[in-house]
Image (cartoon, rainbow, N blue to C red):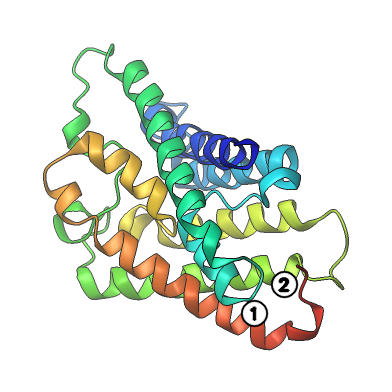
Amino acid sequence: MKVALAEALGAFWLVLGGCGSAVLAAGVPDLGIGFAGVSLAFGLTVVTMAYAVGHISGGHFNPAVSLGLWAAGRFPASQLPGYMIAQVAGGLLGAGVLYLVTSGLPGFDVHAGFASNGFGTHSPGGYPLMPVILIEVVLTAMFVLVITGVTSQRAPAGFAPLAIGLCLTLIHLISIPVDNTSVNPARSTAVALFAGGEFISQLWVFWLAPLVGGLLGGTLGKILFASEQEV
């Protein structure tokens, strides 16, 4: 239960902090934090919670990361369902808190997006399906590869959460204009269920592509760091 709670809290904080910054702070007149601020917010959520609870659960907070670490030989398959359920549940709770905050704002329309991911008309830059799938696969693969590298035995001790958070920041700087950046099915599911409509019908992309990317990144990590793997 302690492990599940740690994963749920990490996903909760990621959605509330990352998606919350996009919904509440990105476009505030004259003081908006913009894409760069939102990117940094996502990275900071991972840094802070990885340092806080990473020693309890490993600090995945993301089904694609859990699957990727399994592919890398770092994580048992038997624990995948429990981790993924906790991550999705925590993300939903974070989105729920965000919804309670924003629903009190006059004129706010949760169905306008609520920081959801999307392609076509729901992409910030109007990107179609195939570029969105490609960037989600590639960026998730690189994210998992970085995670496997910075947590290997020969990596500098104590810096893994910082490197992982900076990697997630970079990923968002690259791809927010493409699809609002997922690389995390729990994050995508949490806000899409509140936004509804086509955001839900497009959700399959933001499960399939990150999971494929996670498997690819984990496999590359296993090849590169096979002699350094930790239990």
Q: Quadrant of residue 144?
A: bottom right
Q: Are marks 1 and 2 in contact (CB under 8 Å)?
A: yes
Where does label 1 land, which residue?
221
Q: Quadrant of residue 13?
A: top right
Nearer to us in this view, 177 or 197: 197
Return the residue found at the far front: 78
Quadrant containing the N terminus is top right
Specify whether residue 23 is in view.
Answer: yes
Q: Is residue 85 above or below residue 128?
A: above
In x, y percent, where is residue 210?
40, 66
Where does label 2 land, which residue?
149
In x, y percent, where is residue 114?
28, 36
Quadrant containing the C terminus is bottom right
The answer to whether 165 appears left or right of 13 in the picture is right
Q: Residue at position x 51%, y 50% from top?
A: 83
Mark nearer the N terminus (1 vs 2): 2
Q: Is residue 148 above or below residue 86?
A: below
In x, y percent, where is residue 199?
19, 48
The answer to whether 220 appears left or right of 182 in the picture is right
Q: Residues within 10 Å of mark 2 (few under 14, many from 20)?
A: many
In x, y percent, where is residue 197?
11, 43
Question: Disc 1 on helix, strand or loop?
Answer: helix
Disc 1 residue type?
Gly
